[in-house]
Image: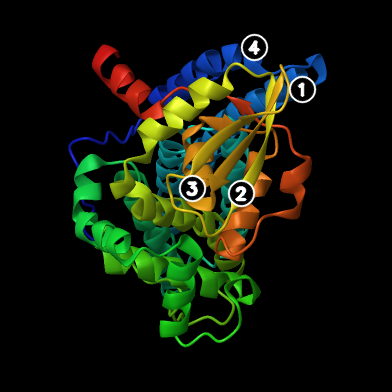
Amino acid sequence: MEFRKYNDVLILEEHSQLRKLAILLRNREEPLMLAIGTEVERIEYLTIMNEAFNNMVSLLSEAQALAQAQTHPAKAEVSKEIEKYIIYAANWTMQCIRNCCMRVTCIEKIKAHFDSMVKELAELNGDNKDEVEDLLTFVKMYTHRMWEYGNTSRSTIARAQSQAFSQGLIMEDITMDELVTRTKNRLGYKPDFEDLEDHQKLEVYETVIKDSGRASLPTMYKRKFRKPGLGDLMDIYGTGVELVQAGVLVYDIFTAEHFIEAALRETASLLADYAEYSVEMMVKAKVKHLVVKKVSKVTAKLIASAAGFVAGAIAGYLFTLATGALLNAIFGSGASRVPHEMEQLKFHAGEMPDGMSIAFEISHLG
């Protein structure tokens, strides 16, 4: 499997570099608590921020310890590949997910996937060459896919690969849920997108990614191994991780040619005058539909398209303490409905630090 590399993306390979990235992100995220109106919510935000940091560092340490502890040659090779997967996962999480309130959820999903890999490794018969080869191949496929997501999610060069597709979506004047439904129907799935199995939802998102030319992802959902049940646990938790990754990438493909980041930055600037605001998400609205309405001196309402809201939440311009759960619900429904919990949530505006830029700082400064 060829690992493509774009020059405007830097994948950090050393544990020390990734720990430094985690520390710098935490330190630069902390001042954002000043945008939060109440002491209780500020404490909650700091808790989430510290969890994102602590859980990331802990996961890296566990992966490193796993690789160092294996003495059986065959199992050692698998453990090294699992460590590489976590290194690439750390890059994707910290460089592509700027919103720490979403990142903490992503790290939880990756940790569950890592634990399933550790369990598969513990149960592996290291002397059975077929089993070892199959499990190693499976982990390598996840590693390759994680690299692709990290390498293509925010790369300007990668975005150029899907530019024609993104421009075509603008000309068609379709919404995100219409794109998802059309792709689902083409694959022959009759239930509504939100009623599909997770691996079917992932296939729909990956079909959009493939159609766009954005990333090259090895197919996971048609694999066959010689030992029944091998990799089943990894599959369940891996699909949970990749459903978020694919959702993030599809939304970027959908919004890329709308150049929405400038509009989001301007909207966040307007919202910065308020201690908090609510969000009314409109499924059928145009991507750039972002309207701020004053409610009182300290509160406002943001009326936003589904695509605009998701783009703003991922980039960290718009955040709520429950961002991770909220985006899970949106990705799981294919943007066909507004999550029920959205009406009760308080949102805050700001600009979270850019892990991608910090990664370059670390590489250049050491």
- Element marked by disc 3: loop
Rendered position, 118 above or below 68: below
Pick whichever of labels 3 and 1 is earlier in the sequence.
Answer: 1
Left or right: where 340 falls relative to 320: right
| Amino acid type indicated by mark 4 | Leu
Query: Foreground residue, 127 or 243?
Result: 243
Q: In this figure, which residue is indicated by the disc labeled 1? A: 41
Pick whichever of labels 4 and 1 is earlier in the sequence.
Answer: 4
Pick whichever of labels 4 and 3 is earlier in the sequence.
Answer: 4
Res 340 quadrant in image: bottom right
Rendered position, 10 above or below 188: above
- For the question of whether residue 238 can be seen, the reply is yes
| Amino acid type indicated by mark 3 | Thr
Instruction: Locate residue 143, reporting x and y percent.
Output: 39, 54
**Mark 1 vs mark 2, CA separation in Å:** 23 Å
- Specify the quadrant that holds the C terminus: top left
- Element marked by disc 2: strand
Nearer to us of marks 3 and 1 is 1
Q: In this figure, which residue is indicated by the disc labeled 3? A: 71
- Element marked by disc 4: helix
Query: CB under 8 Å between callouts 2 and 4?
Result: no
Q: In this figure, which residue is indicated by the disc labeled 2? A: 281
Nearer to us of marks 2 and 4 is 2
Which residue is located at x 53 percent, y 22 percent? 270
Q: In this figure, which residue is indicated by the disc labeled 4? A: 34
Rendered position, 72 above or below 218: above
Res 344 quadrant in image: top right
Res 26 quadrant in image: top right
Which residue is located at x 27 percent, y 41 percent? 155
| Amino acid type indicated by mark 2 | Met
- For the question of whether residue 351 can be seen, the reply is no
